[in-house]
Image (cartoon, rainbow, N blue to C red):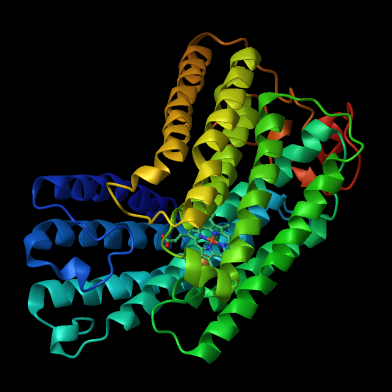
Amino acid sequence: MAFPRINAVAFWMIPPAAVLLMSSFFFGPAQAGWTSYPPLSMDPATLIGQSLWLSSVILLGTSSILGAINFVTTIWEMRVPSMGIWQMPLFVWAMFATSIIILVATPVLTGALLLLSFDLLMGTVFFNPTGGGDPVLYQHMFWFYSHPAVYIMILPGMGLVSEILPVYARKPIFGYRAIAISSMSIAVLGFIVWAHHMFTSGTPEWMRMFFMITSMIIAVPTGIKVFSWVATVWGGKLRLTPAMLFAMGFVSMFVVGGLSGVMLASVPIDIHVTDTYFVVAHLHYVLFGGSVFAVYAGVYHWFPKMTGRFLNEWWGKVHFYSTFIGFNLCFLPMHKLGLLGMPRRVAAYDASFLDLNVLVSTGGFLLGVSTLPFLGNVIYSWLKGPRATGNPWEGLTLEWTTPSPPPVENFERLPVLTVGPYDYGHAGRDPSEIVRH
Ligand code: HEM
Ligand SMILES: [Cu+2]
């Protein structure tokens, strides 16, 4: 890390932020949802809870800005000298794109939340309509951050999967440069689609058209990635380890979420299903079927590297299948519920929605239970799992040339890259062919 101390500061801002957020529950808790739209968030009854919520999110935002400064500098300035940008692992590309988004977007959210807390605590009227403020301005500032934020959440997952698929398909990644460039173009395009969250906020017609078209264009770099992942797996000698299962689960579930995203980007559809369960279905397919599946895949893949021990494969598969079934049982019916008109953010619903909601709840419980084999596996294997060698999966990126777990300084001497990590096929290569020490 270029700035280890800033890294530590960024990390240690998170526990107090968590305490602030949780303590909100004890003081007339914040009740304006994750968007915290005024004037709902200005209810005097929730003043203390809402202020605690705001200070927590401002702290978290500052933490991620500091983290992003660190990532950008480290990636740009501190690679091993022999590693050009086109030899960087795709996960590093993804983190680079993510960090740029954080640097540009997060200060805007932090600013909006500061202005909102001025309105709340000092009587200013930036957003308060009773004093002439503009609540829609808040929505613009909020979504200027929060649409790019969905890419902050998914791009690292896309990077993980781009690392994992080639290893278990035993083929080089298809379209390395296309994947790297699409990460960067998503980072840029992600900044001109935000008002697709505001199609029903009195947004003028021309603006709706503009944001509808840009939102559809962003499906192009996303589609390029999906094609590259499918082409990577195509014709490979697949090893269906838990990491590979979760990575392929990611691709398939993310496609479902991407398709409902494109549907929502269409104004005539969105004005009917906005604020219904259709949106809840969409966001869970991209965020859970996407980001969470990718993080699970990453844990199974790098656990031996991090701990020096293997996770149990059989329990890993139990984890995958129960997650996959529970997930779809829980979130697939939500599409239908949304199309039937069940609103989001309600505690009670019309009796006609009961049957589908029983399915949803059953899936929800299964999804909850599915984490138990995972947690058990992690705890047991960390203590007693079989020992892992340096490169058990025949990975070709640099971390696999170190012992598991790696020594404190990672490498005794700086490795010298002789070929890029994706330049050639996999099966059984000796990692010493990648680097000269
Ligand atoms: C092809 C790409 C995508 C498109 C075109 C798209 C489009 C949309 C649209 C139009 C909405 C607003 C629906 C409404 O409220 O009426 C929406 C909501 C949402 N999307 Fe996506 N989306 C895409 C990908 C993603 C990804 C990758 C994520 C996260 C990983 C994501 C997360 C969300 C979330 C969290 C919401 C709900 C926000 C809220 O609380 O209102 N989307 N999406
Ligand atoms: Cu969006």
Q: Which residue occupies the extreme front position in the image?
A: 352
In this picture, residue 51 sits left or right of residue 183:
left
Of the pair 181 and 132, the residue shown nearer to us: 132
* Residue 330 image point, x, y percent: 49, 37
Of the pair 339 and 139, the residue shown nearer to us: 339
* Residue 93 image point, x, y percent: 67, 57
| In the depicted structure, whether residue 311 falls above or below residue 28 | above
| In the depicted structure, whether residue 193 falls above or below residue 423 | below
In this picture, residue 270 sits left or right of residue 399:
left
* Residue 348 image point, x, y percent: 28, 46
| In the depicted structure, whether residue 73 falls above or below residue 395 | below
| In the depicted structure, whether residue 50 falls above or below residue 195 | above
Q: Residue at x 72, y 49 (%)?
A: 89
Of the pair 195 and 388, the residue shown nearer to us: 195
Q: Residue at x 79, y 31 (%)?
A: 168
So how many labels did they put on this image?
A: 0
Q: Residue at x 65, y 33 (%)?
A: 246
Residue 120 visible (yes or no): yes
* Residue 83 image point, x, y percent: 75, 54
Q: Quadrant of residue 305?
A: top right
In this picture, residue 310 sits left or right of residue 336:
right
Quadrant for the C terminus in the image = top right
Q: Quadrant of residue 97?
A: bottom right
In this picture, residue 87 sits left or right of residue 21:
right
Of the pair 324 and 150, the residue shown nearer to us: 324
Q: Residue at x 56, y 69 (%)?
A: 269
Residue 406 visible (yes or no): no
Q: Quadrant of residue 221?
A: bottom right
